[in-house]
Image (cartoon, rainbow, N blue to C red):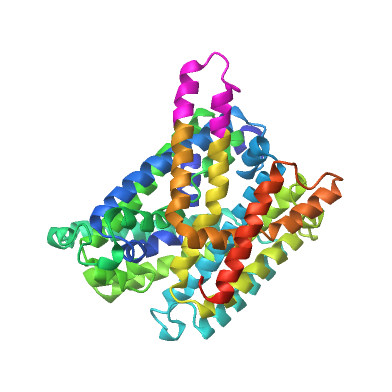
Amino acid sequence: MTGESRKLGLGSLTALVVGSMVGGGIFSLPQNIAARADVGAVLIGWGITAVGMLALAFVFQGLANRKPQLDGGVYVYAKAGLGDYMGFSSAWGYWIRAWLGNVGYFVLLFSTLGYFFPVFGQGNTPLAIACASVLLWCVHALVLRGIKEAAMINLITTLAKLVPILLFIVIVIVGLAFDRDIFTRDIWGRSNPQFGGVLEQVRNMMLVTVFVFIGIEGASVYSSRAERRRDVGKATVIGFLGVLALLMLVNLLSLGVMTQPELAALQNPSMAGVLEHVVGRWGAVLISIGLAVSLLGALLSWALLCAEILFVCAKDGTMPAFLRRENANQVPVNALWLTNGMIQLFLLITLFSQGIYLSLIYLASSMILVPYLWSAVYALLLALRGETYEDQAGLRRKDLAIGLLAVGYAIWLLNAGGVKYLLLSALLYAPGALLFRQAKREQGQVLFTRYEWPIFAAVLLTAVLAGYGLYAGHLSL
């Protein structure tokens, strides 16, 4: 297919946004949120998330329109605005978030199967990890043979995700399962002293909401293939509002079906437990089957996507040249081995951690915050300098306000994540300097500029503190 037949209309772009954001996270949302906050704080948290994520959506839309030549992914904005090391760090963090998400998918898949086969438990029992490892390397072998995401896989997995979610919402509403008395029983969570105050509850739930919105930048990635450039912004807003409605309905309806302590005690995928409470066992079976099909398809497509992130970065010199190597089937083989090797390592780590799925959500969300923050900073810098805003004073003021809001939201999220996940993130960021050094040597360039040295020193010091914390038992995943 060539020319106009490859162009994407508003419907296709909107589907890309929705498909990027709706993953396994929504199926575990009732328990994930209830374990951290009650109704009042949940409403406030969703309000902050809606405004902040919409600001980020406008940031990606604006950058796609104003800098169309920067089409290598989110990391290129950090590289263009803040230098090579920040660009590399954004790419590295984006890649880590991608494969950490895959680790979470494996845990959630076998936690789902644990509903039918208790031996899999919460998805991190020895048998669950052994089976997940076998599945990982089966997917690895399939991808090496050149099996990529096809339209049929996309269709099946999208339906598998959306149909159970929509049925859940309809059944709860039509079946009048929502109980206002349950919803308002302890709206500020005062009966749960471990929650803390409202602000603390809001902070505690924020990284969960970020995780379920990751992928909001999806339409901007495909802006060059849009039939009309303005459709990118429309698709981003429409897709975002649609997904926001789904997420809030699932979360808030659940809080009116079961009490907060009951929701917090559910096994993930907790949406299955909520629907079972409403209609019986067949409800849990429906949600579990839909999620399992969705996750199996996602594992295949994300396995290649994770490798593609490294491959694309290696092609423009951000990553070392060995990650550009492809096999006879045009699969980036070295990037795939590195990605799946890290997934395998973290699958083994999950054997020794309780509540691992929520921990992986928080850690993956922390890793994505750096690329999001630097993208927002770059958009803000463009507005401050007036770059690309010739004779557009009104639009410049608007984008300046959006940039400030997006930067403030990203900083708020870093604070909401707390010291623990900031330290763990640094522990994952620091080793990336070895690949950055190799890429620089291959190009005959100086390793760090005088501005980058202090940044790297701060990352390294934070990573050392995190390593000591893990060793001394003060820090855990």
In the visual, does 448 lie left or right of 93?
right
Quadrant containing the N terminus is: top right
Residue at the top extreme?
Answer: 391
Q: Position of residue 291 (x, y in %)?
A: 43, 66
The residue sitting at 45% across, 50% down in the picture is 413
Position of 381 relative to 359 (above/below):
above
Give the magenta-colored segment's residue range: 379-401
In the visual, does 240 lie left or right of 321?
left
In the visual, does 475 lie left or right of 163?
right
Q: Quadrant of residue 74?
A: top right
Decide whether the magenta segment is chiefly helix, strand or loop.
Answer: helix
Residue 248 visible within the image:
yes
Q: Position of residue 251 (x, y in %)?
A: 30, 57
Q: Position of residue 410 (x, y in %)?
A: 47, 45
Q: Foreground residue, 122 or 82?
A: 82
The residue sitting at 67% across, 42% down in the picture is 72
Position of 219 relative to 459 (above/below):
above
The residue sitting at 69% across, 41% down in the picture is 451
